[in-house]
Image: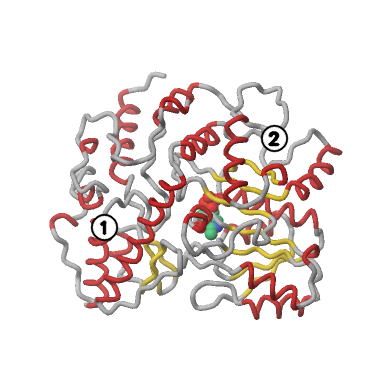
Amino acid sequence: MTFSPADHTRLEAFWRYCLTHQYFNVGYPESADFDYSLLHRFMRFSINNCGDWNEYSNYLLNSFDFEREVMRFFAELFHIPFEDSWGYVTNGGTEGNMFGCYLARELFPDATLYYSQDTHYSVAKIVRLLRIKAQVVASQANGEMDYDDLVARIAADGERHPIIFANIGTTLRGATDNIATIQQRLAQAGIRREDYYLHADAALSGMILPFVDAPEPYSFADGIDSICVSGHKMIGSPMPCGIVVARRANVERISVEIDYISARDQTISGSRNGHTPLMMWAALRSRSMDDWRERIQRCLDLAQHAVDRLRAAGIDAWRNPNSITVVFPCPSASVWKRHCLATSGDTAHLITTAHHRDSTQIDALVDEVIADLKAPGKPVTLSPLQAPLVDGLGSRNRVYSTVGQPRPELLPGHARPERDSGVARLKGSDI
Ligand SMILES: *Cc1c(COP(=O)(O)O)cnc(C)c1O
């Protein structure tokens, strides 16, 4: 590939832009501390996982063997025997949610799907695409589903086959819908287990709850029928991806119907990314369960640190149990925009992801939020370290550096990022 000088300059500028912003996403749960460099050489191949990793494919350049191992890991993580499960590496949480809703609709074609107000925006889109009747259920103050409203709506609809879309960690407030409570309430309403479908949207918390001491229920053993997780959130990946796991018996019911029309293909898209299964495999192989526990505990501790600091300053900050999402009153636009905080109505949130190796970035942000909220209307004065970018490689990076040092790759002419110590690294023997 050759570029004109102008195009070369343009790419160079984008490279610097990416370096500047790589850790600058405190409102969103994307972990940036990954290192897949041992996989870079596979970028020259057109790897395509179209179809099912469990079947022979005529397209030989696939990474099915790796995808199978990824799915084995998640079956175990979510407490379902591998042989009783089926799932695949998706393009992200949204596709996993769509797959779960699709399975549910194929099982109960006329059913109504119930999801809470706090549900990710993609679900409204999914129910429209799949033409599923849907009802929005009220949320409690912490973002968790209002179970009284759920059963009241099911009763009012006379719905005999409700599809329940449960959040295992909502996007804005990190709330987990209690699937044990949901099932108790359905049983009390006289709805038998085989008459409803329960999908768990665990885009972020699917990689948190299995690693904490006192998790809310989240697994197949707890009664779910399918679950999705995003790969680019807690795990971290350079391109969006995720996984979905479902009960094999349910998937086989749909695959029989699809069989009838064409080849056996249970996934949503035709061609599928063959590189992301490799990445997920690498991420999972390069960390032990204890590594994950440590990583997740660090994020939770940091979230609590932010809550403690804000509350000590008299600001009404809080987080849900086992959540790395810290909710607080929305500061001025200048503050949330500068820090890329996510906001909704009168609240904002920050998310403590694993590349925050110490509290430097969070503390700097908390300082500004406190200054802003305690002195409304007063312009926030910036310390030199917090000054906005000057030249695209400005001081802001140092504030947000996760290693507390100016990052060498931020210097012009430095071609490859140096990696933080302690991040996922592939061992040569794993390849
Ligand atoms: C991020 C998120 C999604 C969407 O996942 P993508 O990987 O971005 O498609 C869905 N649900 C929840 C709760 C999320 O946080």
- The scheme the figure's colours follow is secondary structure
Q: Where is residue 314 in the image (x, y as percent from the top left)?
A: 27, 79
Q: Where is residue 335 in the image (x, y as percent from the top left)?
A: 28, 64
Kind of residue indicated by mark 2: Asp
Measured Cα–Cα span from mark 1 to mark 2: 43 Å
Of the numbered discs in the image, which one, if any, rests on residue 52?
Answer: 2
Q: Nearer the viewer, residue 121 or 324?
A: 324
Q: Nearer the viewer, residue 277 or 130?
A: 277
> Quarter-wise, where is residue 64 in the image?
top right
Q: Residue at x 21, y 54 (%)?
A: 388
Give the vertical position of 26 relative to 143 (above or below): above
Q: Which residue is drawn at 48% across and 21% down?
A: 44
Residue at which label 1 appears: 359
Of the numbered discs in the image, which one, if any, rests on residue 34?
Answer: none
Q: Residue at x 43, y 54 (%)?
A: 29
Q: Where is residue 370 in the image (x, y as percent from the top left)?
A: 24, 72
